[in-house]
Amino acid sequence: MDFDETPQEAAFRAECIEWLDANVPADGGGARDQTAITISDPDVENAYVARCKAWQRTKYDGSWGSITWPTEYGGKGLSGIHEGIFKEEEAKRVAATGVFAVGIGMAGPTIIGHGTDAQKERFLPAMLKGEEVWCQLFSEPVAGSDLGGLRTTAVRDGDEWVVNGQKVWTSGAQYSDWGILLTRTDPDQPKHRGITYFLVDMNTPGIEVRPLVQITGAAHFNEVFLSDVRIPHENILGGVNTGWGPIMTTLSNERALIGGSNARTRFNELVKLAQQTGTDQDPVIRQELAKTYTRMEILKYQGYRVRTATSRGELPGPESSTMKLAISLHFGEMGDLVMAMSGAAGMLHGDNARDEGRWQYEFLGQWASRIGGGTDNIQRNTIGEKVLGLPPDIRVDKGVPFRDIPS
Ligand SMILES: Cc1cc2nc3c(=O)[nH]c(=O)nc-3n(C[C@H](O)[C@H](O)[C@H](O)COP(=O)(O)OP(=O)(O)OC[C@H]3O[C@@H](n4cnc5c(N)ncnc54)[C@H](O)[C@@H]3O)c2cc1C
């Protein structure tokens, strides 16, 4: 593993710092970004979406819209290691980026990998300019961990496909312009085949978005009902019945994205909370702080390992599952620690809570990372099978035509 930046990487970091310091708006986000996702208030949410769009546009205009995307789509065409450096510096300045996680972080790389030239031209520049926000219409009431069990159907009608079904837990559907949508198009094939991946305009008639309120009080995700939604054939990504390839690209980008989100809370912010709550002299809290610091350092070096592999041109494999699991366990333990430091004040809500409820969000938000993007148990299965070589999970429906699997 290379711990030191090469002179070129150090020079790139200096370039990032110079540009970010000159361009991140003074009101770029800060604690208000956390609040935008903790409070169910459309005005706060819309303002947050607008800040994200404005910041993405600034980055695009300055040629920083994406570090890794090819230059012909507005990216810088640099390596994952450069992207890691830019994101590290951007996160320190708390710029608003959240609403582009699905678009730029997941849908974009999938279109780059599997899209037609026309799809790349139509969608990629608009994403990078911050003009279009995307959501991910994958999970269904009976298809989450077992995504191959999805039941939303698409039936061809001339140059269009007619989609019917229900999605759930769709983050950001309420303000998204486009969605990546999975449908069953051939129930006679085994469940991981016969799936088709669509790019869908969220304003198409027949799409109904209903908010779901989370444990944090925010309605960050939704149920999405699709009734006779007509999608042009040209919006299929990766071919009819062969959606599983692009799905894997999207999911590995999602895990890498969540696994790379270590910067949510910095250690000095935890120390400050301990000082403010007077728990900095408590020996048990001090011990937990030390453990947290150790975990953060380990996560940092795990991140370097993935980045080193990327800079050598290797594709990160099951490391993304290891990182995702390690991060979600870390969020859980850190959430418990901030509540222990807050004491009875941890029960306060809204304006009464310290730092606009940020620490309550930290605690209650831990389950989002432990479930979203694949649960802890699913990451353990992947690590068991792909890293440790343990026997695979039992799959009684393997090879069985989808229509013969009991629902
Ligand atoms: C904050 C958040 C945002 C999300 N955003 C989106 C989104 O934008 N788009 C989208 O499509 N989805 C989204 N999801 C859904 C997410 O992908 C699913 O919740 C997740 O994959 C788990 O699926 P499930 O909820 O159906 O739970 P289930 O799959 O029913 O799992 C229930 C429990 O069983 C365990 N389990 C299941 N199968 C196994 C197994 N084989 N071995 C061991 N244990 C197992 C799980 O670990 C879990 O504890 C989001 C979820 C959250 C929490």
Image (cartoon, helix red, strand yellow):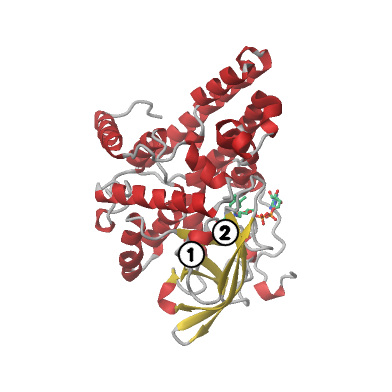
Q: Position of residue 233 (x, y in %)?
A: 44, 78
> Where in the figure is residue 336, as x and y percent of width and height?
66, 31
Q: Which residue is most to the front?
A: 351
Is 248 or 85 nearer to us in this picture?
A: 85
Residue found at x 57% / y 52%: 220
| Mark 2 or 1, nearer chain start | 2
Q: Nearer the viewer, residue 106 or 38?
A: 38
In the foreground, 109 or 20: 20
Q: Looking at the picture, how far across and down is residue 194, in whole percent?
A: 56, 72
Say which element carries label 2.
loop
**Residue 4 visible in the current orientation:** yes
The residue where tag 2 is placed is 170
Residue shown at 46%/47% (left/top)?
Answer: 98
Q: Which residue position is annotated with label 1?
A: 179
Q: Position of residue 163 (x, y in %)?
A: 56, 77
The 10 Å Cα crowd at callout 1, few under 14, some 14 to 19, many 20 or more, is many
Tell me, yes or no, whether the two marked residues, 2 and 1, touch with CB atoms within 8 Å. yes
Q: Amino acid at mark 1?
A: Gly
Amino acid type, mark 2: Thr
Residue 223 appears left or right of 25: right
Q: Quadrant of the N terminus?
A: top left
